[in-house]
């Protein structure tokens, strides 16, 4: 270092001896290969892209360097002054280089024998950070000085200072003053106090050495220096200095919410943004992306999906322990899984080690803490049997049949420890298991297409595959409203009677026989279409498809925006064409919106780091079906909830329309439910398409999740019914023969019809298809 200082003196001495001619020559030598100013005058630092919810909360960040752009006008006046006082008090008086400051620094450094004070101006620091290398050489210092002088001809002082305050590294991964403010004080830069501003300004020479989290005393010494310099410059009074020094420094960091709430939603936003703007722009461009995600809805939806999948997995019995340890592995496991007492809150899950078991329960260890799992919490741990319903398998009443010493299992904290003679100071736990079955939930407002909540699985940490947008699965009976909407535009009505009787098809190219059945394996004879949809009768639906033709069903599905590969076979009418949950929500939006479909929206608008608008979305709406057909479908699907497989949604005590769906062997379970203000779809199934087990249907596995979520958010909306369009006539009909309800009618329904298609004949109470019913029964006897 001494050689550098001595060299500096020699340079100044030589310059003095050479005079003007020598200085010009030196200038020409140093300025031969100077870089241009494009990188500075078109300042584009690596900035954080921020994703916002519709209420302005932060959903997450994308970045390579944690830097947020903030304008000088948005900083408190004393923050830039704190940096100027500490680094370059003459900033507004020099032209990029301060010769006196360089000379003073040189003398002080020579006197101390090491670098104690720098002489670079803020303009020079900007040049060094953005254009030059950090090497210590005479040539680099001269270039720095020349470029600093030139830069001040191109940019204003305010522009240079703005670049500087956004560019500097201030420790703990924070680049720029806004990131530092969030990192050290948990607030935005405009909310910093004078005392806090001085702490941040004091970080600059050595951020790790003056880190207040690790070295508060050193940070306070630097704070005192900065405040003293501000007083000396006349920018604050001694009284302000004293008040700042007396202020208690409270450290706090704004937590990064990224991938905490709404990780699947955030990932969809990230994928969209990368496709549209490129990865570099997304991770360095400082974009502001505004979404319609509502955190209240999002948290409610994620919680409902998790609880529903956990309940579903318990209905299928015990998977077994996560692993079984030998005794010499106990200590290592307990050390690795150590927990603090503060984290042992009711409802939290932990991996625990079983140490003793008897018939009544199991003693376990949670790190250094003791726990107990009663056999009463193991009642569900039956041997899995997909062919039997839960209530057909006896409950577990002996804990030794479930776990053994050395087993590692999941357990949920039930309650805090209490002292009793059997289990003193022991945490009471419940046996749990993470589900293998997966699912998804999407909730959107049909008037705008705004997706307020989306979750594509049980755990984003476990699997980033988004089952809401990427998994194509068979919707089963959730596809039937598409079939019936086409039927009602092809001359059929809710009162049309069709036969529910066996059907057998032979594929002569493969010699395979297809015998579709109703879920209950029962045939009901003549059935009105209203009941066929409400009760989800497969055989009637197939006859409807035969009558109107598969082409009309395919055309309807495509008109509703479904992006499925429709095969021209009758199984398609029962929902064999695979779709994503988000896509099916789009199709159902026609029923909720009165006939038009709306594209689901996850992005509302995007602005640049400087606030320029880059993207602004408007609802994309297309005509799909008539308002009359949409209203009829809403009316029938309200009856699915009131009188059919969607009965769980009745708990909301509001007008709700919906349809369950279950594919063959309970591989996929769906519930699509909607009101005029909110449309929500739920899907449940294994990723490997295995069967979920008896009765794991859309009604049980999916609609329970739907209800759990909607109960938490329904209060946000006033109760609304679907508005009745013109061209609709409401008529009460006989539920058995589809005629106008008469005095002898035992079962009747108040149904919507397109005006002019409603029944005109009054029922006498007899079925209009007795002959067909007999024919159907005879056919049933022949086949079975």
Image (cartoon, rainbow, N blue to C red):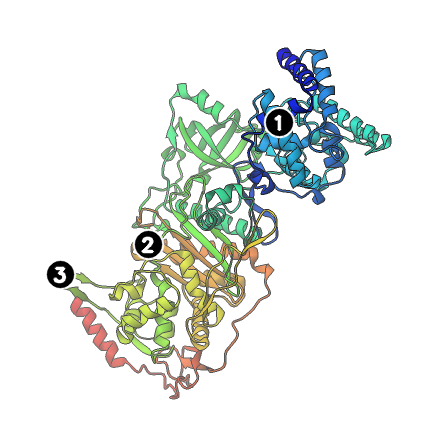
Give me the residue at 31% from left, 64% from top.
Answer: 574
Q: Where is residue 738, by image quadrant?
A: bottom left
Q: Secondary structure at mark 1?
A: helix
Looking at the image, tell me whether mark 2 or mark 3 is earlier in sequence order: 3
- The residue beneath circle 2 is 666
Residue 173, position as x, y percentages in the image: 58, 31
Q: Are marks 1 and 2 in contact (CB under 8 Å)?
A: no
Residue position marked by numbered label 1 in the rendering: 27
Residue displayed at 71% across by 22% down: 102
Viewer-closest of 2 and 693: 2
Label 3 vs label 1: CA separation? 93 Å
Q: Secondary structure at mark 3?
A: loop
Which quarter of the rendering shows the N terminus? Answer: top right
Marker count (numbered): 3
For label 3, the residue is 511
- Identify the residue shown where x is 77% and y is 25%: 224
Visible in this render: residue 601?
A: yes
| Looking at the image, residue 111 lies above or below residue 641 | above
Q: Which of label 1 and label 2 is nearer to you? A: 1
Q: Position of residue 563 (x, y in %)?
A: 35, 60
Counting from the top left corner in percent of width and height, residue 603 is at 51, 55
Q: Is residue 678 above or below residue 454?
A: below
Q: N-terminal of the two: label 3 or label 1?
A: 1
Residue 355 picture location, percent across and down: 44, 26
10 Å crowding of disc 2: few (<14), some (14-19), many (20+): many
Answer with left or right where residue 768 lies relative to residue 364.
left
Q: Where's the C terminus, which quadrant? A: bottom left
């Amino acid at each position: 270092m001494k050689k550098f200082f001595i060299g500096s003196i020699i340079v100044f001495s030589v310059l003095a001896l050479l005079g003007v001619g020598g200085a010009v020559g030196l200038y020409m030598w140093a300025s031969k290969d100077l870089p241009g100013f494009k990188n500075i005058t078109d300042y584009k630092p690596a900035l954080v892209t921020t994703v916002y919810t519709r209420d302005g909360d932060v959903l997450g960040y994308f970045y390579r360097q944690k830097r947020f752009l903030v304008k000088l006008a948005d900083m408190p006046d004393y923050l830039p002054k704190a940096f100027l006082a500490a680094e370059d008090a003459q900033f507004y008086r020099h032209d990029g280089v301060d010769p006196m400051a360089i000379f003073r620094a040189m003398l002080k450094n020579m006197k101390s024998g090491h670098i104690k004070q720098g002489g670079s101006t803020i303009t020079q620091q900007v040049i060094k950070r953005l254009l030059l290398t950090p090497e210590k050489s005479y040539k680099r210092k001269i270039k720095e000085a020349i470029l600093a002088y030139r830069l001040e001809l191109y940019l204003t002082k305010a522009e240079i200072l703005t670049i500087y305050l956004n560019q500097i590294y201030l420790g703990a991964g924070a680049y720029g003053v806004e990131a530092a403010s969030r990192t050290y004080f948990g607030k935005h830069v405009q909310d910093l106090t004078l005392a806090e501003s001085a702490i941040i300004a004091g970080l600059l020479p050595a951020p790790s050495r003056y880190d207040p989290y690790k070295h508060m005393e050193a940070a306070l010494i630097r704070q005192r220096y900065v405040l003293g310099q501000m007083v000396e410059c006349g920018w604050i009074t001694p009284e302000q200095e004293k008040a700042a020094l007396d202020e208690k420094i409270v450290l706090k960091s704004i937590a990064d919410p990224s991938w905490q709430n709404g990780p699947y939603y955030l990932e969809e936003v990230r994928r969209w943004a990368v496709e549209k703007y490129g990865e570099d722009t997304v991770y360095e461009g400082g974009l502001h992306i505004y979404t319609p995600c509502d955190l209240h809805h999002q948290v409610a939806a994620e919680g409902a999906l998790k609880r529903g999948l956990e309940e579903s997995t318990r209905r299928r019995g015990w998977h077994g322990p996560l692993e079984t340890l030998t005794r010499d592995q106990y200590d290592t496991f307990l050390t690795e899984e150590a927990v603090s007492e503060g984290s042992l809150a009711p409802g939290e899950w932990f991996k625990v080690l079983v140490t003793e078991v008897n018939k009544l329960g199991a003693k376990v260890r949670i790190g250094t803490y003791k726990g107990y799992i009663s056999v009463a919490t193991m009642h569900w741990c039956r041997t899995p049997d997909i062919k039997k319903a839960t209530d057909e398998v006896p409950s577990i009443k002996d804990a030794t049949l479930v776990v053994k010493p050395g087993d590692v299992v999941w357990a949920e904290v039930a309650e805090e420890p209490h002292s009793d003679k059997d289990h003193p100071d022991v945490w009471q736990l419940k046996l749990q298991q993470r589900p293998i079955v997966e699912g998804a939930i999407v909730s959107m407002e049909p008037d705008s297409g705004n997706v307020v909540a989306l979750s594509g699985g049980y755990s984003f940490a476990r699997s980033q595959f988004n089952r809401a947008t990427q998994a194509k699965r068979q919707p089963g009976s959730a596809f039937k409203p598409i079939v019936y909407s086409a039927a009602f535009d092809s001359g059929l009505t809710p009162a049309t009677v069709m036969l529910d009787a066996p059907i057998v098809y032979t594929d002569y190219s493969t010699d395979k026989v297809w015998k579709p059945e109703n879920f209950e394996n029962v045939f009901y004879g003549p059935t009105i279409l209203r009941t066929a949809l409400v009760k989800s009768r497969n055989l009637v639906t197939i006859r409807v498809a035969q009558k109107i033709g598969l082409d009309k069903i395919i055309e309807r599905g495509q008109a509703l925006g479904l992006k499925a590969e429709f095969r021209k076979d009758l199984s398609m009418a029962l929902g064999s064409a695979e779709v994503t949950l988000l896509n099916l929500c789009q199709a159902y939006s026609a029923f909720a919106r009165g006939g038009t479909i709306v594209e689901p929206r996850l992005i509302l608008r995007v602005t640049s780091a400087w606030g320029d608008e880059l993207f602004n979305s408007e609802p994309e709406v297309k005509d799909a079906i008539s308002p009359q057909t949409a209203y009829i479908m809403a009316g029938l699907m309200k009856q699915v909830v009131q009188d059919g497989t969607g009965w769980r949604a009745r708990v909301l005590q509001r007008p709700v329309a919906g349809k369950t769906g279950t594919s063959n062997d309970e591989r996929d379970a769906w519930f699509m439910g909607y009101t005029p203000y909110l449309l929500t779809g739920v899907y449940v199934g294994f990723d490997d398409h295995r069967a979920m087990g008896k009765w794991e249907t859309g009604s049980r596995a999916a609609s329970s999740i739907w209800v759990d979520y909607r109960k938490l958010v329904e209060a946000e909306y006033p109760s609304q019914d679907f508005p009745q369009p013109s061209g609709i006539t409401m008529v009460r009909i006989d539920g058995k023969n589809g005629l106008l309800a008469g005095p002898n009618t035992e079962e009747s329904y108040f149904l919507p019809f397109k005006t002019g298609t409603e029944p005109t004949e009054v029922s006498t109470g007899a079925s209009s298809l007795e002959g067909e019913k007999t024919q159907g029964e005879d056919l049933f006897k022949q086949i079975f």
